[in-house]
Amino acid sequence: MTTIEVGKKLVELCKQGKNQEAMDALYAPDIVSVEAGAMPGMSAEVRGREAVFAKSKWWNDNHTVHSASTEGPWPHGDRFIVRFSYDVTHKPSSRRFTMDETALFTVKDGKIVREEFFYVTG
Amino acid sequence: MTTIEVGKKLVELCKQGKNQEAMDALYAPDIVSVEAGAMPGMSAEVRGREAVFAKSKWWNDNHTVHSASTEGPWPHGDRFIVRFSYDVTHKPSSRRFTMDETALFTVKDGKIVREEFFYVTG
């Protein structure tokens, strides 16, 4: 798949709430995932599908998603940007909040090898 | 200025339509500007404030802006992403169209040293 095809597939699956399916289909074995800020007790950067899937599972286990939107992709060479918005409740604290972030994905040989999340921290 | 301060200033000025003032204030002398696709007769990559300002002037001379919106910034380390949307008419062809793009900016020593525009081409 080309970069734009990978981006469109990712957005299409995320719009359907199929984020795990998107990762299964599109993430390279050596995917690197980098947060703008480290979550409590976690590293800002994790490597490999297992670690990325574990991070996603942690997030899903700790949040109830009330609504979500995915916009993009905006491509440029072997990279593309996607915008994610969420209305969620953090289960442990029962605090409800909105998240608005963008992510920069890098594609190599038809798979996503790097994802970097951009958002305001602190 | 920190990366987030530079991003906020850029967005604030662009929201006011002060794009040239934003470039004057925030662009480094050796700024590199990279398009997702080359415009007709132009290079996808230009270097230096003069070349970037000339590209901006070419764009302004050739388009009438009916409305514009700027969203962001979404920061990550020394970079941030901004989303730009425009409703414009291309003057030579009188064709009206909308543009929806994101841009990835890199900051060094309080100035923007690189801008990369992400959008669907062709």
Image (cartoon, coloured by chain):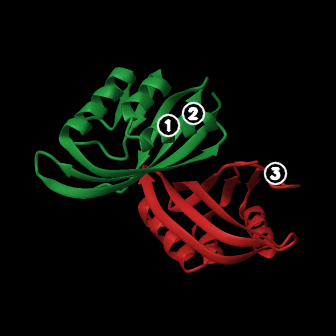
Chain colours: A red, B green
B63 above or below A89? above
How packed is label 2: few (under 14 Cα within 10 Å), some, or many (20 or more)? many
The one nearer the camera, B16 or B56, is B16
A52 above or below A46? below
The mark found on residue B6 in the picture is 2
**Circles 3, 1 touching at the beta carbon (< 8 Å):** no
The one nearer the camera, A81 or A28, is A81
How packed is label 1: few (under 14 Cα within 10 Å), some, or many (20 or more)? many
| Residue A118 visible at all | yes
Residue A6 percent across, percent down from the top left: 48, 65
What residue is drawn where x is 62% and y is 74%?
A19
Kind of residue at disc 3: Ser
What is the C-alpha distance between the residues marked 3 and 2? 26 Å
Position of B2 with respect to B23 (left or right) is right
A115 above or below B92? below
The mark found on residue A10 in the picture is none
Residue B74 percent across, percent down from the top left: 59, 48
Residue A99 percent across, percent down from the top left: 66, 62
* Secondary structure at numbered mark 2: helix
Which of the chains bears the disc numbered 1? B
What residue is drawn where x is 12% and y is 52%?
B94
Q: Are discs 3 and 2 located on one and the same chain?
A: no
Q: Which residue carries the number 3 mark?
A: A43
Q: Quadrant of residue B43?
A: top left
Residue B48 percent across, percent down from the top left: 39, 22
The mark found on residue B10 in the picture is 1
**Circles 1, 2 touching at the beta carbon (< 8 Å):** yes
What residue is drawn where x is 81% and y is 51%?
A43
Which of the chains bears the disc numbered 2? B
Kind of residue at disc 2: Val
What is the C-alpha distance between the residues marked 3 and 1? 30 Å
* Secondary structure at numbered mark 1: helix
